Image (cartoon, rainbow, N blue to C red):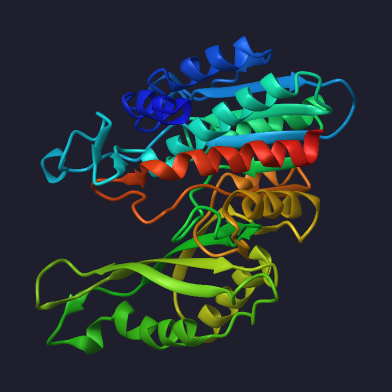
Amino acid sequence: MSDTLALLEALIARPSVTPLDAGCQELIAARLTAIGFEIEGMDSGPESFRVSNLWAIKRGRSDGPVLMFAGHTDVVPPGRLDAWASDPFVPSYRDGRIYGRGAADMKGSVAAMVVAAEEFVATHPDHAGSLAFLLTSDEEGPSIDGTKVCCQVLQARGQRLDYCIVGEPTSVDSVGDMLKNGRRGTLSGKLRVKGIQGHVAYPQLARNPVHQAAPALAELANMVWDAGNAYFPATTFQISNISAGTGATNVIPGEMVLDFNFRFSTESTPEGLKARVLALLERHGLEYALDWTLGGEPFLTPVGTLSEAVCAAIRQETGLNAQLSTTGGTSDGRFIAKICPQVIEFGPINASIHKIDEYLPADSLEPLKNIYRLTLENLLL
């Protein structure tokens, strides 16, 4: 069994459901310490939701570039245990796959990054620049006391970061066929449209907020927010939840509550999107209250040194020409991009992430680890 697979087994066996780390970072810290890394815990958050964060850095022979591997040791809840073919926290093998919660998202990446660093340091103990790790147990949760806080601490210290590889599972069919050089922003709204409750037989004595809001919602759903650009698809608007009424069939509701979300490109801004929504609601004469939550702004790393180094490593290991993409949800890259000019997300096949019976092809870990190691050689030698 390879070192990468053995480490992945050990990480899967630790039930690190957000915000728990369950000893994953302690295991990783011990291995990194053994090869010369300086280790620092950056735990954050209240005792009821304490988040484990790990910062580690190995300084090279010069003031060359600083490359950081970033990832998370927490996983989403497994769901119904009886729906799994095997215990989600006992690594299991079937049909050439390793099964377990977090195998793909993202303990496989973390294991590959650690072993890649071990091999790189063993072969190149006098490497240039610095190699760093930033790990959190709050990526799958609120993401308040994890990477976001760590980046604020590093920025306050003046810690320079030149390149960052986030181990998100980005590959689609084969390891290396896709990497992310950016992500869309996310802006959510909770809209409360106020009406007057009454009897359905006497609508003249009431005001139905659902009827009032329907034309505005139709317009919002069909509005073109922007056309995207060469890197990003067009901004999208989606309604996720609507509730109104008392449950009785003969009562006009007094309020409608609606949740919606924008996934927006760099062609739009949170301020611009908010202004357009508010103007539309005012134009439709609604009585309303609207609360906004900015989950993250878009980030983009144009083609450059880091993406070229990763793509060259992928070609060398697999022969594939990786596709650059900005599709998908948000990641901790949105926080790192504020302090690091080049951020790339690259990791294993994402077909089973967050699903029952999450898995990785067992033979995909060595190529992933080799790509990480080759990238280090491309940038730190």
Q: Residue at x 72, y 54 (%)?
A: 307
As displayed, is residue 215 above or below residue 36? below
Quadrant where the image shows the N terminus:
top left
As displayed, is residue 137 above or below residue 125? below
Q: Looking at the image, which residue sits at the far right?
A: 63
- The location of residue 182, given as percent across then percent down, is 64, 58
- Residue 38 lies left or right of residue 51; in this view the side is right
- The location of residue 310, given as percent across then percent down, is 68, 49
Closer to the camera, 155 or 189?
155
Closer to the camera, 159 or 349?
349
As displayed, is residue 296 above or below residue 228? above
Q: Residue at x 45, y 82 (%)?
A: 221
- Residue 298 lies left or right of residue 80; in this view the side is right
Quadrant where the image shows the C terminus:
top right
Is residue 161 in sight in this rendering? no
- Residue 224 lies left or right of residue 242; in this view the side is right
Q: Residue at x 47, y 34 (%)?
A: 138
- The location of residue 19, given as percent across then percent down, is 41, 29
Q: Residue at x 10, y 41 (%)?
A: 82
Please count the marks in the image: 0
- The location of residue 341, given as percent across then percent down, is 78, 47
Is residue 28 in sight in this rendering? yes
